[in-house]
Amino acid sequence: MSRFARRIHIGASPAAVWSKLVDVEGWPAWASQFTSLTLLDPGPLTLGTRVRVRPKGMTAATWRVTEYEEGRSFTWEASPAPGLRLAGGHVVTPEGDGAGAEFWLDASGPLGAVLGPVLRRTVFSRNTRSATEGLRRALEGGSPA
């Protein structure tokens, strides 16, 4: 397992954070690593929803929501290459005067076992930082850190 997680406090209600998270097509406005995210299924994000994710400088992949708890968390997975399975999780929790937001990424499979340590140090670290800090800026206002 090659899981990397980042947690951040956001000065907004858990409901506001959740609303921003499940609006995946809006992510490129606050998560600079994405060119686009496109819902492939009608309706809101929920269990089973497929999303076409285009990261900047990388090949697009279809991610499918595999776990979903309304208002709290979702996990989605993709297999962008043979032997490589990626999973990402997003968790929102009440925290003092706002919310805690956690983003995690994991690589598994034979290729994931080989690439995982490198992915954790580079892509996973960079993307979870960009996404959590971007989400906080989008909800609190302010300039990039």
Image: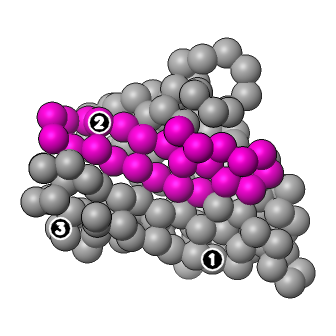
* Residue at position x 13%, y 50% in the image: 110
Report if residue 83 lies within the magenta region: yes
Residue occupied by mark 1: 8
Comparing marks 1 and 2, which lies closer to the viewer?
Answer: 2
Of labels 3 and 2, the one closer to you:
2
Query: What is the x, y in percent for residue 109?
Result: 20, 48
| Residue drawn at 82 percent across, 72 percent down | 94
Q: Are marks 1 and 3 in contact (CB under 8 Å)?
A: no
Q: Nearer the viewer, residue 33 or 88?
A: 88
- Disc 3 from disc 2: Cα separation: 18 Å
- The number of discs equals 3
Q: Nearer the viewer, residue 33 or 95?
A: 95
Q: What percent of the width, then of the height, locates residue 63? A: 44, 34
Q: Along the polypeptide, which appears first: circle 3 or circle 2?
A: 2
Nearer the observer, 54 or 95: 95
Q: Position of residue 1 (x, y in %)?
A: 28, 64
Q: Amino acid at mark 2?
A: Ser
Considering only vertical position in the picture, is 45 above or below 104? Answer: above
Instruction: Residue type at mark 3: give it.
Output: Val
Q: Which residues are magenta?
A: 66-90
Q: Amino acid at mark 1?
A: Ile
- The quarter holding residue 16 reads bottom right
Q: Is residue 4 magenta?
A: no
Disc with the residue nearer the chain's start (1 vs 2): 1
**Local SS, label 3:** helix
Can you identify the residue that label 3 sits on? 118
